[in-house]
Every structure is written in structure tokens, then in C-alpha cells.
Image (cartoon, rainbow, N blue to C red):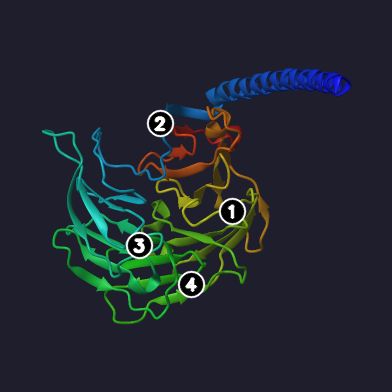
Amino acid sequence: MRRQQQQTHVLDTQDTQDMEDTEDTQDTQDMEDTEQSEDVLEDWFIESLKTYKDLHVYQLERPTRVIEWTSGKIVHGGFTDGPVRRLRHVPGTRCVVTNDGLSSDLQVWDLGGDDSDVIRRTGSVKGRRGVSEGGSRVAARLSSRPRVLHGAQSGDVQLTELSSGQPLYKLESDSADPVGSLHFVTDAVFVVGCSNGNVHVADTRTPDAPQLSPAPSGESVTWWTDVSAGPSCLDPSSCRIVRLSSSGLTVISDLRKPGGAVSRAQLDVQTRCCNVDDVRVSWAPALDDCIAVSGFSGAVHIYDTSVWRAEPQDVRPLFEHRGHAVSSQSDDGVPVFVTSHVWHPERARTLLSAASDGSVHVWDWVDRSAADG
């Protein structure tokens, strides 16, 4: 019995030594990782003096998943009773429309005026279905009669007048494709981008069924869509549709022939389990041929699509905003990824982006290729 106690004591001492050695090794590794992270951050900040015309970094308590530019300088706030999964400012008004991701109904909010800095809920817009997994997508456009386009599936998309809540147009479709995004082209023409890659082009002036363009490939992947609305889209016929798949395949089509492909590219994306709300692809509204992509990693990538060809090719980004990843204050070991981004409507190279660690960045990037040329 005594020998067993002695043996046990020796084992305990050895275990303690191993634990101390492990802790020392871990502390050393943590210090090295911290020093390496600080070096990367310092290098990035030095690099940013040349790669950014303007850069603002903010840290919030919780991650932001929906962001939107509004006209003018609005510094107002408010509280909601439920989650906000979609948010859209209605141009020309002081209203924003939200969706909670639980139903197809929309909530209408007033941003407040000079006499109040409180955002208040003022009404709601009824959707075409009750419970809706993922909620409704929303689009808005500057109009003399403010209206919103909304829907969760391709068969229940409708155009609604904001002031009265009356439906102005209902998309008649036999399909029930999950809607990934909605886009106005004109007051009468809009595009429905579905998460399975299908695209519906509808014209409210005609009784004809919407034009359906199937997914660019037969792969079972998730797709994200955007429609150009920049300087090159003064005529609706010159607008382009970009579709991005979860495998990185990107296809650009002419709005007049959405089933065809003007150009294709293969983006080098990090493969991770992405749902339809994780990734965003968007055309620059004030810069021809450029798109921004985020959600696959902790970076926002800018691509110049003018150099893409009809045959698929591997492409590199014109610019990469790595700020969220390199400046992350997260210490739980979970990789940071960008949760949302949006272009400034007028400043050509200014974007607003947010990440899973609560960081929010406003940045105006420099086109080094133009500067070097």
C-alpha cells in the first residue's frame, strides 16, 4: 500500500511538471501568435497609408448583419421588439423598411426629423404568406409614389404602395423558388434573383408572364445575384446581371438575354458552409464594371469585370480589404468573416462593411493599377 502511494505521488508530480511545461509552451506560443498578429496589423496599417484614400474603423458590442446608406447626415436610433434580418431605406423619404426573417410581413419605420432623433415604427406592410422561413427580401426605388418590392418566394413577390399598403402588382409564377434578392431596373421592370440560380425578369406594364432564366450551371450550389445600376445602366437594355455561386463561379449576363453569358470567371473563394444570408455580391453604383464580393472570408474583394472573357478563367481581385481580419479583437480562435458590405451611392470607391467580431469599417480604396499605369 505504501509503495502504491509512493508510485501515485511520483505520477502526480510528473503530471504537474507536464502541465507546467505545457502551460509554458502554450504561453510561449500565445506570445508568439500575439506578436505575429501585431506585426501583421502594423504592416497593414502602414500599407493602408498607400492603399486607402480614407479609412475609418469602429468597434461595436455586437456584430452588424444589415447596413444601408441613407441620404444626408442622419444620426438617429431606436429599438425593435424583434430581430431585423432585412433593412432597406426608401429613397426620397425618411423611411426604412425591415423584415424580421420570421414572416413575409414588413415593418415601416420613420427615421425622425429635426425635432427628434428617435427612429419610430409607423406601420407595416402585409406579405402574401404568413410564416416564411428566412423572411422576405426587400427592394426600394426613388419614386413619386414610394413603393417597395418584397417577397420570400418567386411565386409571392409583389409591389406595394408604401403609404396605403395596397398591392400594385403581384408576380404570377408557378414556381416557388426561394428569393435571394430583388432589384428594380425601372419603375416598371424588376429582377428576382433566386438562391437556386434562377432569375425572373418582370414588367408590370404587361400581363405577360415573367421571363425565366435558369441557373447558369447544373451544380447544386447556392447563388447570389445583383443587377447593375451605375453609369453604364442609363438605358435598361444596357443593364447587366451578375450571378455568383458558392463554388466561386461568377457569370455576367445582359438583361436583354439573361440566359446567355457575356463573361465568366472563377473566383478564388474559401469554401465554407454558406447560407443565403452570408454572402453578398454587388455592382458599384458609381464605378463602371466593378463588383464587390464578401462573406466567404474576413475580406471584401473588388473585381474589375471589364477584363473577363466569355470562357471561364481564374481571376484575382483588383483590391482586397483585409482590415476586418487583421484588426480583429476576437480571442476565441473563431475566424472572422465579413457579414455585410454596401457601396456608397455617389462616392465611386467608398464602401461600408461589417464583420462577425462587431467591427464596422468605412473605406475609400485606391486603384493601384490605375496609379501604376
- The quadrant where residue 50 appears: top right
Amino acid carrying label 1: it is: Cys
Q: Are marks 3 and 1 in contact (CB under 8 Å)?
A: no
Q: Quick check: 30 left or right of 138?
A: right
Q: What residue is rendered at 63% in x and 24% in y? A: 37
Amino acid carrying label 2: it is: Glu
| Mark before the other along the chain sequence, 1 or 2 | 2
Furthest residue in direction right, as rendered: 3
| Mark before the other along the chain sequence, 3 or 1 | 3
Q: Secondary structure at mark 4?
A: loop
- Residue 302 place in picture, x, y as percent: 54, 44
Foreground residue among 324 and 273: 273
Q: How would you rate the neighbour count of disc 4 (Cα within 10 Å): few for under 14, some for 14-19, many for 20 or more?
A: some
Q: Quick check: 51 left or right of 74?
A: right
| Mark before the other along the chain sequence, 4 or 1 | 4
Q: What residue is rendered at 46% in x and 61% in y? A: 240
Residue receiving disc 2: 61
| Mark before the other along the chain sequence, 4 or 2 | 2
Foreground residue among 192 and 110: 110
Q: Quadrant of the N terminus?
A: top right
| Mark before the other along the chain sequence, 2 or 3 | 2
Q: CA distance from mark 1 to mark 2?
A: 25 Å
- Residue 127 place in picture, x, y as percent: 27, 66
Furthest residue in direction front, as rendered: 1
Residue receiving disc 3: 185
Residue receiving disc 4: 257
Residue receiving disc 1: 273
Q: Secondary structure at mark 3?
A: loop
Q: CA distance from mark 2 to mark 3?
A: 37 Å
